[in-house]
Image (cartoon, helix red, strand yellow):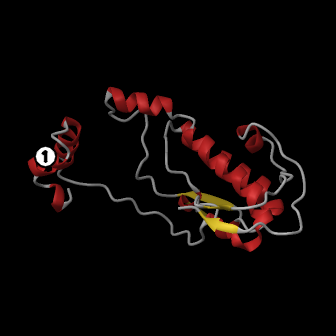
Amino acid sequence: MASEHQDVDTVVAKFDGAPGVRARLEALAGPTSSLVLFSEYVPHPLSDWLTDPLERAELSERRLFDIVAILRSRELLHLDGHFANMRAVDDRVHLVDFGLATSPRFDLSPPERDFAARNVAHDADYPAMRLVNWLATAPCAGSRLRRPQDASWVPATGTCAGVRTATSRTSAHASRRTRTACPTSTSSISKNT
């Protein structure tokens, strides 16, 4: 357990005496060993791999749904599947950072079990939404919008009337298909605060 959490009473007091905080810290203090997971280093963020929407859209969709199928087959909820937690090499996409992962097979409290049940579709829906947003904005913004994991970057003025996507399942997640070509002028990009 982290040294700053060893004084359980002090930490619990900072959280207004929350019994859940106490239970969690006491559970962390109990084990006499810990587990460290090492995995292969995959240096390329997905944003570096997603450079051409027309070339990568269908493959990206397939890889994201492959990841979701693997998670579901193991009853695992990753819950943090944004593009910054996806790494790519060749034609493979790797999901990393399982720090928020949970499973109904874990020893969960009733509220935690309810949370897992309510969010079972999150690992499919959130990356699909990000992929659709990237497909709809990246071609119109040119090289200025190449980081799909940065949710704060959006077109400020003008719109891309839509983007013809080669994907079907992702578009179904987004509720509709859009078709058109981007205008020749580029939209200005601003950072929302």
Residue 46 in sight from this viewpoint:
yes
In the rendered view of the protein, which quadrant contains the N terminus? Answer: bottom left
Residue drawn at the location 20% of the way across and 59% of the way down:
2
Horizontal and vertical percent for residue 39?
A: 46, 63
Residue drawn at the location 70% of the way across and 61% of the way down:
155
Circle 1 SS class: helix
Eyeballing the image, is 116 above or below 100?
above
Q: Amino acid at mark 1?
A: Ala
Horizontal and vertical percent for residue 117?
A: 47, 29
Horizontal and vertical percent for residue 35?
A: 31, 55
Residue drawn at the location 72% of the way across and 50% of the way down:
132
Q: Nearer the viewer, residue 93 or 6?
A: 6
**Image label count:** 1
Residue 146 in sight from this viewpoint:
no
Give the residue pinned by disc 1: 13
- Which quarter of the picture shows residue 140? bottom right
